[in-house]
Image (cartoon, grey):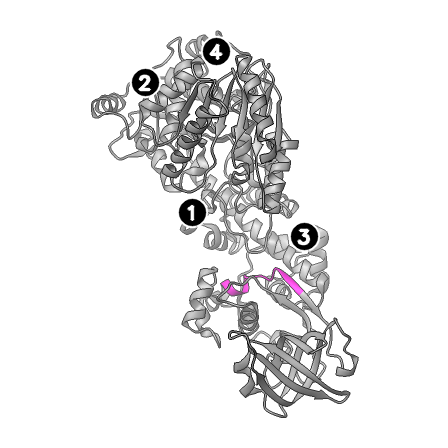
Amino acid sequence: MEAALDRTAERGGAYLPRALASGEPLERERLLTAPLKSMPRPSVLDAPITKLRGAGPKLAAAAEEMGIASLGDLLRHLPHGYRDRAEPVALAELRLGEEATVEVEVVSAKVRPTRRRRLTILEAQVSDSSGRAKAVWFNRAWLADRLQPGTRLLLHGKLEKRGLNVSEHEFLDSSEAGLHTTGIVPVHPASERLRPQRIREWVWQAIAQARHAVEPVPGRLRRELRMAAVEDALVASHFPADEHAAEAARDRLAFEELFLYQAALVSRRGRRVSGDRGIPLPERGSRVEAWMEPLPFELTGDQRRAIEEIDEDLAGAQPMQRLLMGEVGSGKTVVALYAMLRAIEAGHQAALMAPTETLAEQHFRTLQALLAAGPAPVTLLTSATSPARRRALLESLAAGQPQLVVGTHALIEEAVEFSSLAVAVVDEQHRFGVRQRAALDAKGPGGRLPHVLHMTATPIPRTLSLTAYGDLDTTALRELPAGRQPITTRVVDEESRPAAYDFIRARLREGRQAFVVCPLVADSEAVQAKAAEAEAKRLAASELRDFRVALLHGQMTSEQKARAMDSFVSGEPDVLVATTVIEVGIDVPNATVMLVEGAERFGLSQLHQLRGRVGRGKHPSFCILFGDPESEAARARLDAIAEQGDGFALAEVDLSIRGEGEILGTRQHGLPRFRAATLPEDTSLLLEARRRVLELRERHGSLEAASLGPLMDEARRRFGDERREQISA
């Protein structure tokens, strides 16, 4: 990382484009080298892009769709690539099939009609001191009026038999001459409505305002890292002298971005845990010990370490904020239950909030089984809870009865009042927004905050744990309980379907059971349900007609789902055809085959979760994936799931395939849109940024210290409270 920053420092202010072959004074060089006449004024960069020439209402609206509303947004809209276009060559030096830039004068121009109604061809005879040639534009008939004899042009294109096929052109009477056709040409992310050339022209107009950019990295740290000024890095990222300058500038801006984001996360965590706002719990007592002693399994080393970390958190006056993530079947629920029982043993209340009614019901059933000895009452609150049961539950919670309640968003409704909520568990927490988790915090007694344990069944790479969850302590469960069976995974095509069903029938005749999962074919749960219903009927009448086939999907009532699941657990049906409602929380040791239809439609973590529904007993288990991937990403996912059984390793693969923006499903589930940084490629920059932020907090006592300048103001502006829904954590 420091080497990249060194390259930036070495070039300093040398971020200037190459001179044009014409030798004319360069307007852009004048702009970039003009002395600063006043102190930077950050408000200048808040001006709308409509201040720029050519940024009318329609194009400005298209830019806003891409996140470009102000001059500052535009300067932070960095190129994703560059084209190295050498100085202009003479027409006589053009070679067939090669791209080049030429400086020419128009001799004549005309539009040639074609048989294809929507295709127009503009042809111009052009010349320079070495000779003449024909230049050709497709669908640029409107340009003909400007190509008057004597007009001087810069053309870039490829020489073909019919002439120079022009890809970009510029008029030499423009102050922007050479911007698109010579030197290192930036290529910015664009859209159908907004072309890269237009963005490049806007950036060129705005680049002089880079001197007004706020410098958020404290001066001492910049000197330690030999870091170039922010304005130099912005100029170099758009108009670099060479590829090394572009790379160094991007690294500098990426570090700044990750540095500010980490500062926002660390500061946000500090605000939540500042002061003694938690509920300290006494040491573990006999009640919890009595529950742990007869458990029918031995805790793994990871589970024991997690419990030790939770004990330390619960003893403090600062509220716990811990992320518990683990491999499929690693025992997260037992650890979460331990934390909740600690609260109940101390005379308080505990809650587990799940994102869906189905998952809440599954948790409720699991907790009922784990609490069979009766160390604590457990209740369920969802939208399906009957009015009478709801009233009784709300009354007992308001009265302060120590109990454990499982529910959905219903738990944070205004009518639900906890008398003494001390521990809250949020499952699949990335599916909840910031406001929802804040509403759960508000359920604490007397302005105090409950200890919160966030759970996710998706192992998260370290890179993402420091971005999406950078303000949480993290505990990972990697060990699997003793006796868990490895799962053999195969990706098969339609030609292998008869053999696959032969294999399933053989396992069923041995007394085992199987899952068949139908893909998510649309956002509508109703569509999923129809697909599952149709497949269940088809299997019962064809390949699996000699076996009992049951159905489970999210459109069923709570009672229907409970009956279907109870029946399958008891071994009555041989096959359960389901949608993704079985993705988590299902434990059927006798199920040894998982067949997934349309596997290419699923994400990598989702496939791993589905696969984890088997392999829970003493028998060898198998996962059969029917997939027909059309994209390279889909093929990479299926190859990875077939070759790798470790969820943490798969999470790294998923990150490399999808990038940091989509790893958790959707953007609002936890990650910002970084403009300069790219993860996981910039992991080293991220770790360095995190380390430097923590060092500054330790050295200055707070990131708000005046000596740190505008650090936190800029961190809040880019990643702060006003954008918390975008960077929820």
Q: Earlier in the sequence, mark 4 or mark 1?
A: 4
In the image, residue 53 sits, relative to residue 8, either above or below, namely below
Magenta highlight range: 73-82
Residue 352 in view (yes/no): no
Q: Of the residues under marks 4 and 3, which one precedes in the sequence?
A: 3
Residue beneath disc 4 = 292
The disc, 3 or 2, on the residue closer to the chain's N-terminal end is: 3
Residue 80 lies in the magenta stretch: yes
User: Is 81 covered by the magenta stretch?
Assistant: yes
Q: Is residue 704 above or below residue 517?
A: below
As helix, strand or loop, the secondary structure at mark 2 comes to loop
Tell me the number on the disc at residue 224: 3
**Neighbour class for label 3 at 10 Å: few (<14), some, many (≥20)?**
few
Q: Amino acid at mark 3?
A: Glu
For the point 61% across and 78% down, which residue is it? 137
Residue 412 left/right relative to 319: left
* Mark 1 secondary-structure assignment: loop
Q: Which residue type does callout 1 highlight? A: Arg
C-alpha separation, residue under disc 1 versus residue under disc 2: 33 Å
Give the number of the mark in front: 4 or 2: 4
Given the image, on which type of amino acid does mark 4 rest? Met
Looking at the image, is mark 4 or mark 2 earlier in the sequence?
Answer: 4
Q: Closer to the N terminus: mark 1 or mark 2?
A: 2
- Which residue does the numbered mark 1 point to in the structure image? 724
Q: Nearer the viewer, mark 3 or mark 2?
A: 2
Looking at the image, do the residues carrying marks 1 and 2 touch, with CB atoms under 8 Å apart?
A: no
Count neighbours of disc 1 (C-alpha within 10 A) and say few if under 14, some if 14 to 19, many if 20 or more. Answer: some
All told, the count of numbered labels is 4
**Closer to the observer: label 1 or label 3?**
1
Task: Tell me what residue is drawn at x 46 percent, y 16 percent.
Answer: 283
Label 3 sits on a secondary structure element that is helix
Residue matched to label 2: 402
